[in-house]
Amino acid sequence: MNILLVSHQLDYTGAPIALLELAKSLIRLEHKVCISSLKTGPLLTEFIKSGINLFDHEKNTADDYDLIIANTVISVPPSLSFGKSSKKVLAWIHESEYFFNIIRKSPDNFRLDELKFVAFPSKFQIDEFSKWMPSALKVQLKNCVQIPNNIAIDNKGPYFVCSGEWETRKGQDQLVRHLGNLEEFPEIHFVGAIKPLHLSLEKFVFTGHLTPLEAKNRIASSRGVISCAVSETQNLVAIEAMQLAVPVMLSDIPAHRELKKLIPDIVIFDASSIESFRSNFKLLLNQWADSAARMRLKEAATHWFGMLEFDKNVSDLINLVNES
């Protein structure tokens, strides 16, 4: 099949990176793939390196493609307009209901009710979005996480990682409050974040924007990944960490509970409770010292979110869309 992928942007964030893995999978499955984006960005280079061409508006039309895949809510309207009624459009939605609270717009603005085929990384999203797309065929397509062979471990001393730009959804301020209540203040690297003006503690390291490889190197060298997030769809950084045999401590939200069902060794805590944070932080430290537990994390995360599982699920999804 000739497949056009449509993204809202091509920066080093979760949804575009997930789309890159989907593009690679489609190529492995012998489909022809092209990428179009509302905004360009540094990830475009990775698409081109992987043999995925950029859509040329002067040379290409919708008639050149058998299927159009949108990877975010924002990219759904242009995908529907581009595909019109003659083309099949599949949306792989990487947002949760929380997204509409952030942007202060109604889901009705994004033509979700016109979709016939929708996939989600996590099952809880299906329940959240069903009211806006009651007639669509809705399935789960978990993300694929690939760890490169050239990971570099540094020896800068023990530290923990919290990943993502500084925003309410990621819960970094809550994490800082909890850390202040520990007897011994651990060093935290905020990967992907720029230092907020209201913080001055020395044990915080702010990396700013990193390439995916740089971020993985930082995670691989850490003692654990901590997330106080109030909303996630599927925590790619946590999955990367586990594939690197690095333990994770995740807030008790639907996306993280789904991960724990697949990978029981994940440490889950109540992000609103300092007592829960304290006790589970001790579990995280114990897990770092337990090589068998870390190996179980690596094996489970690699199985559920590795290339073989993903390619099978992508193949099944494409066949399902074709047959419908």
Image (spheres, helix red, strand yellow):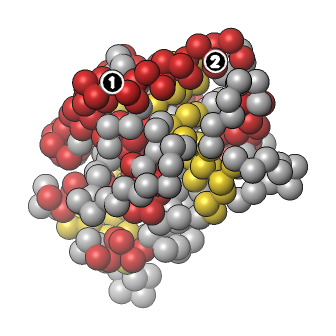
For the point 71% across and 59% down, which residue is it?
194
For the point 43% across and 55% down, which residue is it?
155
Q: Circle 2 sits on which residue? A: 278
Please rate how many residues cluster around mark 2, counting C-alpha atoms within 10 Å: few if below 14, some from 14 to 19, many from 20.
Answer: some
| Viewer-side residue, 100 vs 226 | 226
Q: Is residue 134 left or right of residue 4?
A: right
| Viewer-side residue, 183 vs 162 | 183
Q: Position of residue 97 (x, y in %)?
A: 62, 32
Q: Position of residue 38 (x, y in %)?
A: 55, 68
- Whether residue 258 is visible, yes or no, is no
- Whether residue 152 is visible, yes or no, is yes
At mark 2, the secondary structure is helix
| Viewer-side residue, 321 vs 139 | 139
Mark 2 belongs to which amino acid? Arg
For the point 63% across and 13% down, which residue is it?
276
Q: Is residue 208 left or right of residue 294?
A: right
Residue 290: assigned label: 1
Instruction: Judge whether 10 appears above or below 53 on screen.
Output: above
Residue lying at the far right of the rendered structure: 198
At mark 1, the secondary structure is loop
Mark 1 belongs to which amino acid? Asp
